[in-house]
Image: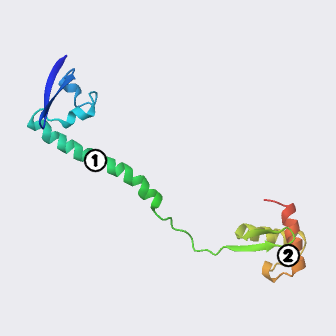
Amino acid sequence: MKYVRVRALTYSLYAAIPDRKYLNRGIVFHFLSWFPLNMEETEMQKVRRYIRGALLTAALAVPVALVAAPVPQEAQVQVRVYDSEHKDYHNWDDHENAAWIRFQDENHRKHHEFTKADKKEQAEYWNWRHSHPD
C-alpha cells in the first residue's frame, strides 16, 4: 500500500491510496479528488467537475422540462347533462351520442338530437342508459 501526502491550504492530509489508477475510478473516496496531487491533475479535475456538473444539471432538468411541457389538446367543448331521476351528471360526448342513436333505433324512433327531445323521452333514455352500461 502506497501513502500519498496531499496538501490543502495550511494543513496536511495523509490518505492511504492502494494505487493511483484507482483514484480516477471512484473506488477511493470522492473527497480525495478535491486535493491536488500536482497541477496536471488539478486542471483535469476542473474539467471533469464541470462536465459532471453539466451532466447532473441536464439529468435533473430534462424530466422536469418533460413534465412541465404543456400537451396540446384538441379544441372541444365538454357538455354535461344532468339526470334528475338518478341525480347524476353525464358527459355528453361522441360515445354518449352513439348510445342515444342506439336507443332511438331500439325503440323505433326517428333520429333527432337529444336537446330537441321532450323531458319524457330524455327520462326514458336515462332509464335505458342506466340499464345498458357500456
Name the residue beneath numbered marker 2.
122
Amino acid beneath label 2: Gln
Q: Residues within 10 Å of mark 2 (few under 14, many from 20)?
A: some
Where's residue 124, x and y in %?
A: 89, 72
- Amino acid under label 1? Gly
**Dot 1: what SS?**
helix
Q: 126 above or below 62?
A: below
In the rendered structure, find residue 67 and report the number of the disc placed on it. Answer: none
Q: Locate residue 84, reporting x and y percent.
A: 84, 73
The residue pinned by badge 1 equals 53
Instruction: Pick the quarter of the image with the C terminus.
Output: bottom right
Q: Is residue 55 toward the left or the right of residue 105 in the image?
A: left
Image: 61 above or below 38:
below
Q: Residue at x 80, y 71 (%)?
A: 100
Q: Residue furthest left?
A: 39
> Image height check: is 93 above or below 10?
below
Marks 2/1 in contact by CB < 8 Å: the verdict is no
Horizontal arrangement in the rendering, residue 133 relative to residue 37 (left or right): right
Q: Residue shown at 22%/29% (left/top)? A: 23
Q: Along the horizontal axis of the image, is 110 left or right of 44?
A: right
Residue 2 image offset from top left, x and y in percent? 16, 18
Front residue of this view, candidates 67 and 98: 67
Give 16 or 25, whichever is nearer the viewer: 16
